[in-house]
Amino acid sequence: MTRERYRSPEAKLYRPMYKTPQWKALRKLVISRDLYTCQHKGCGCFVAQGRKHPRSAVVHHIKPHKGDAYLFYDASNLELVCKHCHDGAIQSSERRGYDSTVGVDGWPIDHKHPQHNKRVIGRGLAPLPTSLSQFKIPVVSCVLVCGAPGSGKTTYATDRFNSGDIIIDLDDYKEAVGGVRWDTNYIVTLKAIALRNKALAQLHEMEHGIVWVVLGGRIKRVREAWADALGGASIVVMPTSMQECVRRVQADSARSHALPELIPSIKRWFHAQ
């Protein structure tokens, strides 16, 4: 049974456009322009030869063309992705109407994602687990240190850390589950969030010290939800400017692997204020 049988009548009408010399030449141009590298966020693999390999090249229309010749042949509307991303995350996003990719802060990157519209922060990918409201409130003081990537959150907490204190930082848990700091891998992020949430559930056992929670917290109501769940935690929002945050992450060689995600994350943080 061939794939052709699953195409809609509309798709069959404009399928011949993919066989024109103009498209074939444009396809080669885009593959070369994008340096044979998948442009889908979080992937970045080198595309493979052949059409059936999971990492084979697919030249994807960012805005669906629906037979519109202008959109079809517009190079700025095209990007190189691998077959794995195209047939999985990209087509899934097109069906849902939003991208479910999670950023380095554990929050969906797409503002159209339903989590951005929920008043009560949900379970799983959201920064605050629903069950956190059911945890016993810590008796020790908690401080939320919030800010964009590169704003100095971890440095702020570390400089004020004393014996008996504890720092809860998602990047620490990414390392603990086998990843690296500022890891953009989806599975690593999920495992790190689960481990961090387990640590949050045990905070009520602390009798002394201060809990420093390092959090992106770009949305005010998210910061407030965390503070309430932690028994009225103090909130510190780093005053670092967007330009300085960008400069810092670009100058830090340890973050070079995550720059494609960190720079947009910084911009999203400031645009949410």
Image (cartoon, grey):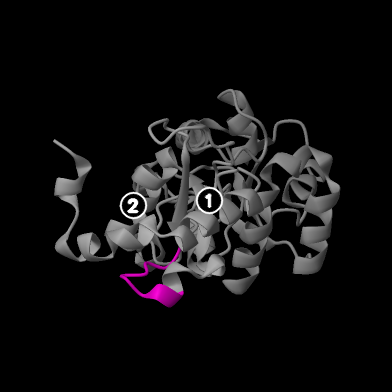
Single out the mark in the foreground, 2 or 1: 1
Q: From the viewer's side, name the closer residue of 251 and 205.
A: 251
- Report the disc number at residue 80: 1
Q: Is residue 81 left or right of residue 210?
A: left
* Residue at the outermost right position: 251
Q: Is residue 19 visible?
A: yes
What's under tag 1, amino acid-wise?
A: Leu
**Element marked by disc 2:** helix
What's under tag 2, amino acid-wise?
A: Gln
User: Label 2: how many residues lie within 10 Å, few (<14), some (14-19) or many (20+)?
Assistant: few
Q: Which residue is mark 2?
A: 91
Asked if residue 122 is positioned above or below residue 209 in the image, the reply reads below
Q: Where residue 117 sits: x, y (%)?
A: 36, 68
What quarter of the picture does the C terminus occupy?
A: bottom right
First in sequence: mark 2 vs mark 1: 1
Distance from Cα at disc 2 to Cα at disc 1: 14 Å
Asked if residue 84 is positioned above or below residue 62 in the image, the reply reads above
Q: Where residue 140 sits: x, y (%)?
A: 59, 43
Q: From the viewer's side, name the closer residue of 134 and 78.
A: 78
Q: From the viewer's side, name the closer residue of 117 and 144.
A: 117
Question: Are discs 2 and 1 less than 8 Å apart at CB?
Answer: no
Q: Where residue 192 sits: x, y (%)?
A: 52, 33
Q: Where residue 184 sits: x, y (%)?
A: 58, 41
The structure residue drawn at horizontal position 57% and vertical position 59%, both measured from the top left corner, is 217
Q: Is residue 78 left or right of residue 254?
A: left
Q: Does the segment drawn in magenta span residue 221?
A: no
**Element marked by disc 1:** strand
The structure residue drawn at horizontal position 47% and vertical position 33%, both measured from the top left corner, is 187
Q: Which residues are magenta?
A: 62-70
Quadrant position of residue 171: top right
The structure residue drawn at horizontal position 55% and vertical position 66%, both measured from the top left corner, is 75
